[in-house]
Amino acid sequence: MNRIAITIALLVVSNTFMTFAWYAHLRNLSHKTWLVAALISWSIALCEYLFQVPANRIGYETLSLAQLKILQEVITLSVFVPFALLYMRQAWSWNYVWAGCCLMGAVFFLFREPARPSLPPPSTAQSSPAAPS
C-alpha cells in the first residue's frame, strides 16, 4: 500500500476519534459535569493522536505540509458530515456541499504543484560574524 493511501486511512480513523471526542459529549454526556465530559473526551482524543501522529509522519514523507493539512481538512469534513447527520441527528444543509466545494478548490491549488519541492537542506554550520573593515 502506498504512503498516501496509508496516510488517508490513518487520518480517517484519527478524525473519527477526533469528531467523537469533540462533539459526542453534547449528545451522550450532557447530564454530566463538564469536567467528566472533558476527561472522557481527552481519553478519546488520546486514541485520535495514536493514529494522527503516524499519519502525519508517513504523509510528510511524500506530501508538503500544506498538502497534508488540506488533506486532513477534507477528511475532517468527510467524517463530520455523516456524524452530524446520522449520529447527532442534525438537519441536512446545502452549506455542507458548498463547504466541500471550497475545500476542493483548496485541494486543486495545493496539489497542482509538485508534492515536495526540492530545496537544499538547511545549513548546520554556524556562520561567523563578518570581520570589521
Image (cartoon, rainbow, N blue to C red):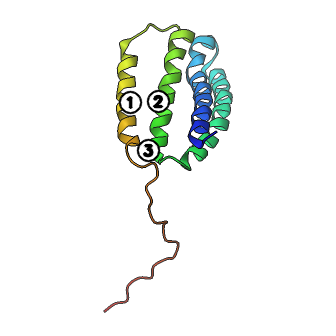
Seen in the image, is 121 located left or right of residue 106? right
The location of residue 65, given as percent across then percent down, is 47, 47
Q: Nearer the viewer, residue 40 or 96?
A: 96
* Residue corresponding to mark 2: 74
Counting residues from the start of the chain, the first of labels 1 and 2 encountered is 2
Which mark, residue 66? 3
Circles 1 and 2 in contact, beta carbons < 8 Å:
yes
Rendered residue at 49%/17% (across/down) = 81
Judged from the image, the secondary structure of the residue bearing numbered disc 3 is helix
- Residue nearer the viewer, 83 or 62: 62
- Give the amino acid at mark 3: Ala
Residue located farthest toward the left when viewing the structure as drawn: 133
> Label 3 crowding class (10 Å Cα cut-off): few <14, some 14-19, many 20+?
some
Say which label, 3 or 2, has the lower sequence index.
Answer: 3
Residue 41 lies in quadrant? top right
Q: Which mark is residue 104?
A: 1
Distance in Å between CA atoms under marks 3 and 2: 12 Å
